[in-house]
Image: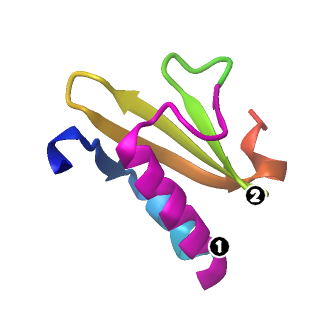
Amino acid sequence: MDLLRWGLEISHPAERDLKRLSPEIKHRISIALNGLRETPWRGCIRKLEGMTAGYRLRVGDWRVIFQPDDERRIVVIVAVLHRSKAYRN
């Protein structure tokens, strides 16, 4: 069944974002990222305006910004931001 799962690639900025989070929030986001590996199209997903292939996953007050790559079948995590900062230019 792992053949059906998507790969996960976490950018350096997203790694920094994750390191700054509390263990509880990291755990919740980890569960959400595992869900993205099953399919990047379920859950609280929305297409982002202004990004060619950008999407956001809502995890409580946090937003996981990601870009699915259909050809390589991976989800690239671009950033993990609090909702108050996620939509600023």
Q: What residue lies at 50% left-to-right and 39% top-to-bottom?
A: 66
Classed neighbour count for the residue bearing mark 1: other residues with Cα under 10 Å, few (<14), some (14–19), many (≥20): some
Find the distance from the CA under tag 2 to the CA under tag 1: 9 Å
Q: Answer with mark 2 or mark 1, whichever residue precedes in sequence.
A: 1
Please, which colouring scheme is shown?
rainbow
Instruction: Residue 22: tell me if it is visible.
Output: no
Q: What element carries label 2?
A: loop
Q: Which x, y percent locates residue 85?
A: 78, 49
Q: Residue at x 57, y 42 (%)?
A: 65
**Snapshot quadrant of residue 87:** top right
Magenta stretch containing residue 67, yes or no? no
Front in this rendered view, residue 16 or 43: 43
| Label number found at residue 25 | 1
Residue extending farthest left: 3
Label 1 secondary element: helix
Per the image, the residue denoted by label 2 is 60
Q: Quadrant of residue 88?
A: top right
Q: Where is residue 41 in the image (x, y as percent from the top left)?
A: 50, 31
**Pointers 2 and 1 in contact (C-beta within 8 Å):** yes
Q: What stretch is highlighted in magenta?
A: 22-47
